[in-house]
Image (cartoon, helix red, strand yellow):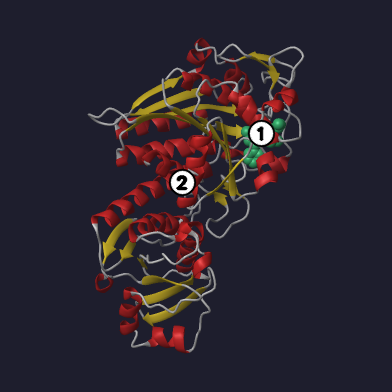
């Protein structure tokens, strides 16, 4: 897909998207331009006949001529708009264009002037609007059609329309382009079935990324993982014929000393059958997506390599399958992780935290300022927060506050879950330092408490994306399937 910035009169697109509030009768430059093209038909339909109420996400389609259709997207009441809602409206519009596609290009107007909105969240300028829009439109247009034999036409060009194109707008659009590419990359990898996406496949992909983006990389095989004493990670992997891989990619700024160093760890279970505590069929159905964390961090490092901020970024993933077999690890097994702490296996389906434990210990040795892990970790986070909100936990409130603020600016929902020290009673073991599960209660928090024992960082943050990484049902922004959640937030967080 190509992205261009243009003035209203320069557009050559077959589809135009205009945003309009329910309670403000304003006419943008692009509206006026299209209205002239239509001999006043737009003005007549929208304001005289009131053919659209401009309710939130309501879409009104009007054909200007054979080659041009206009989609008016309702933004609802001005004071109720947030960035997330704006992104939902834009993505809905893109889906409407795609639903019955004519031509192969979309022109979409950049809006601003939202200062009167009550919510600071809606106060974006045209540059910020461009960044949001590029991502939102690509979310709306996304499809994974590789295995579908009837090929459909697709959108090739996206034009961002405004009268006063500035370097800031161009730059923000670029950030949006690389962010949306990272999302597409992650979603494609998550969609790809586990019969293809094995630990070795992901490791090879990481090697290709390293080559293409000129990054340092280390890929450890099973023997090397054993040499590093990552016995918790190894135990999870031992039930599969596909051997584990441990991947570590490094981005360093060119000729600059980094202003901060961050390690990003992504959970990389390429299939989670549950191990000997096997999952029921309905829960196992989407478990190819249990490597969403790994896909996320691999997407992000590509965007960061293009955007070249003056930070050092370490991307880490412990990749394996969690299977049942004669060689699988068992309930009651005692595992000594690489920081020498012992874990009694209470449930083999709580495997993510075991692999993350060794990855967190590894990150401790890199001398980074911050460690962030992202994982489809607990079913409990779905019970608590549903499918639209990512759980955030950690040991540094400043870091968490900043992250949550940036998530709002990035059109994503996050909510902090607590880690109290009392939780350790839930994971108490009689014969080891702790068990790997804390029972039914507070499952998201007990998982986080478990992880906290494997990091020495005083700026460690944990994102539980079990509810948000993969959707069974479409929501206003994203169709069912992988979402690429937290990529926008994490990229903005790293650039900030
Ligand atoms: N990968 C799952 C968590 C998950 C559940 C992700 C649903 C996406 C959707 C994780 O490995 C798991 O099985 N967690 C268990 C932990 C339990 C045994 C303590 C869970 O949440 O049921
Ligand atoms: Mn599991
Ligand atoms: Zn899992």
Q: Is residue 70 left or right of residue 76?
A: left
Q: What element carries label 2?
A: helix
What percent of the width, then of the height, locates residue 408?
49, 50
What percent of the width, then of the height, locates residue 224?
48, 14
Q: What element carries label 1?
A: helix
* Label 2 neighbour load within 10 Å: few <14, some 14-19, many 20+: many
Residue under the point 40% across and 61% down: 154
**Residue 462 appears in the figure:** yes
The reply to whether callout 1 and callout 2 are in contact (CB within 8 Å) is: no
What percent of the width, then of the height, locates residue 69?
39, 76
Whether 8 is drawn above or below 448: the answer is below
Disc sitting over residue 20 in the figure: none
Would you name the residue on which mark 2 appears?
406
Q: Number of labelled discs?
A: 2
Image-quadrant location for residue 280? top right
Q: Which of these two is toward me, 357 or 66? A: 357
Q: Is residue 278 left or right of residue 138?
A: right
Image-quadrant location for residue 220? top left
Q: Which of these two is toward me, 263 or 334? A: 263
Would you name the residue on which mark 1 appears?
445
């Amino acid at each position: 897909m190509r992205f261009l910035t243009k003035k209203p009169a320069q557009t050559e697109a077959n589809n135009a998207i205009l945003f309009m509030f329910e309670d403000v009768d304003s006419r943008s430059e692009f509206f006026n331009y299209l209205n002239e093209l239509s001999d006043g038909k737009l003005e007549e339909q929208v304001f005289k006949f009131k053919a659209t109420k401009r309710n939130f996400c309501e879409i009104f389609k009007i054909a200007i001529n054979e080659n041009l259709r206009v989609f008016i997207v309702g933004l609802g009441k001005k004071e109720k708009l947030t960035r997330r809602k704006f992104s939902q409206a834009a993505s809905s519009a893109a889906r409407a264009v795609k639903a019955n596609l004519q031509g192969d290009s979309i022109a979409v107007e950049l809006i601003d002037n939202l200062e009167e909105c009550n919510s600071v969240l809606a106060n974006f300028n045209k540059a910020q609007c461009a960044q949001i829009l590029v991502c939102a439109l690509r979310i709306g247009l996304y499809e994974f059609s590789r295995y579908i034999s009837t090929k459909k036409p697709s959108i090739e060009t996206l034009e961002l329309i405004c009268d006063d194109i500035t370097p800031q707008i161009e730059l923000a659009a670029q950030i949006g382009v690389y962010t949306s590419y990272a999302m597409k990359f992650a979603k494609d990898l998550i969609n790809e079935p586990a019969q293809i996406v094995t630990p070795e496949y992901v490791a090879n992909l990481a090697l290709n990324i390293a080559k293409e983006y000129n990054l340092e990389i280390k890929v450890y095989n099973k023997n090397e993982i054993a040499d590093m004493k990552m016995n918790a990670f190894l135990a999870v992997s031992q039930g599969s014929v596909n051997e584990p891989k441990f991947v570590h990619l490094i981005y360093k700024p060119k000729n600059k000393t980094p202003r901060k160093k961050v390690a990003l760890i992504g959970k990389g279970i390429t299939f989670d059958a549950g191990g000997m505590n096997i999952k029921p069929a309905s829960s196992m159905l989407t478990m190819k997506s249990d490597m969403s964390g790994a896909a996320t961090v691999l997407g992000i490092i590509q965007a960061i390599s293009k955007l070249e901020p003056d930070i050092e970024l370490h991307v880490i993933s412990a990749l394996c399958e969690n299977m049942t077999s004669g060689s699988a690890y068992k309930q009651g097994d005692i595992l000594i992780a690489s920081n020498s702490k012992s874990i009694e296996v209470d449930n083999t389906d709580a495997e993510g935290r075991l692999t993350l434990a060794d990855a967190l210990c590894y990150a401790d040795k890199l001398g980074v300022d911050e460690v962030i892990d992202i994982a489809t970790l607990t079913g409990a986070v779905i019970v608590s927060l549903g499918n639209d909100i990512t759980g955030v936990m950690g040991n540094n409130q400043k870091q968490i506050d900043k992250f949550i603020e940036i998530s709002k600016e990035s059109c994503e929902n996050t909510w902090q879950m607590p880690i109290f020290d009392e939780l350790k009673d839930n994971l108490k073991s009689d014969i080891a330092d702790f068990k790997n599960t804390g029972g039914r209660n507070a499952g998201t928090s007990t998982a986080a408490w478990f992880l906290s024992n494997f990091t020495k960082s005083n700026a460690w943050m944990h994102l539980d994306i079990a509810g948000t990484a993969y959707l069974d049902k479409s929501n206003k922004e994203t169709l069912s399937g992988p979402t690429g959640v937290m990529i926008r937030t994490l990229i903005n967080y790293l650039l900030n």
